[in-house]
Image: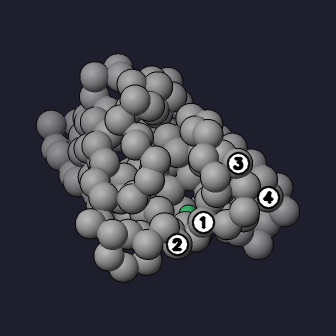
């Protein structure tokens, strides 16, 4: 069996709104993430990690934001499509670890739901998805509440 790892990162600006979509979960907030899709930074980072592990490019190449079919779409759809693409190339997904970088709100109550949403989309057990979060100590664009970012690492394997 052979193993490969991939790294993903994403950042979206915050703007007017009343909820965040992170890890496929709607979280009540006084702002929303701005993006062509739903701005789900965690799912975009996980998608990029998986594509990177398989050498398949990045999310912008596979799901271009110039394509009207992806406007306002749930990013869970990207994840599902990515899992299908990987399996069609002979890869299986091992595990995923991730960090969400956000000053507010407190995200840990939503981790179990995020794990389940991501695991279902990828067709792997929720125990193989790890979600964590950090603040940026009130510094920089994240710490002052202008943006939220996420990073992820994925392990894939094949015969
Ligand atoms: Mg993005």
- Inter-mark Cα distance, 3 to 4: 19 Å
Among the two numbered marks 3 and 4 on one chain, the one whose residue lies closer to the N terminus: 3
Q: Please say if the residues under marks 3 and 4 sit with CB atoms less than 8 Å apart.
A: no
Q: Please say if the residues under marks 4 and 1 sit with CB atoms less than 8 Å apart.
A: no
The verdict on label 4 being within 8 Å of ligand 1 is no
Tell me the quarter of the image containing the C terminus. top left
Q: Look at the numbered disc 1 and give the secondary structure of its residue.
A: strand
As displayed, is residue 91 above or below residue 72? above
Camera-near label (4 vs 1) is 1
- Inter-mark Cα distance, 1 to 3: 11 Å
Among the two numbered marks 2 and 1 on one chain, the one whose residue lies closer to the N terminus: 1
Nearer to me, 93 or 24: 24
- Report the residue marked by disc 2: 146
Q: Look at the numbered disc 4 and give the secondary structure of its residue.
A: loop
Residue drawn 79% across and 66% down? 67
Q: Ligand 1, what quadrant?
A: bottom right
Residue drawn 44% across and 72% down? 144
As displayed, is residue 100 above or below residue 119? below
- Inter-mark Cα distance, 4 to 1: 17 Å
Q: Which numbered disc covers residue 18?
A: 3
Tell me the quarter of the image containing the N terminus. top left
- Report the residue marked by disc 4: 71
Q: Does residue 13 appear in the picture of this structure?
A: yes
As displayed, is residue 17 above or below residue 137? above
Camera-near label (4 vs 2) is 2
């Amino acid at each position: 069996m052979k193993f490969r790892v991939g790294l993903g990162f994403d950042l979206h600006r915050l703007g007017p709104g009343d909820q965040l979509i992170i890890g496929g979960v709607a979280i009540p907030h006084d702002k929303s993430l701005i993006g062509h899709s739903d701005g789900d930074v965690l799912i975009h980072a996980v998608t990029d990690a998986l594509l990177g592990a398989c050498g398949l490019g990045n999310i912008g190449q596979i799901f271009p934001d110039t394509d009207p079919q992806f406007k306002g779409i749930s990013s869970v759809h990207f994840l599902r499509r990515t899992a299908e693409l990987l399996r069609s190339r002979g890869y299986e997904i091992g595990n995923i670890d991730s960090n969400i970088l956000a000053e507010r709100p407190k995200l840990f109550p939503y981790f179990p739901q995020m794990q389940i949403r991501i695991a279902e989309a990828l067709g792997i057990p929720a125990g193989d998805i790890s979600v964590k979060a950090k603040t940026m100590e009130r510094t920089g664009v994240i710490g002052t509440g202008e943006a939220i970012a996420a990073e992820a690492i994925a392990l894939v394997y094949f015969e």
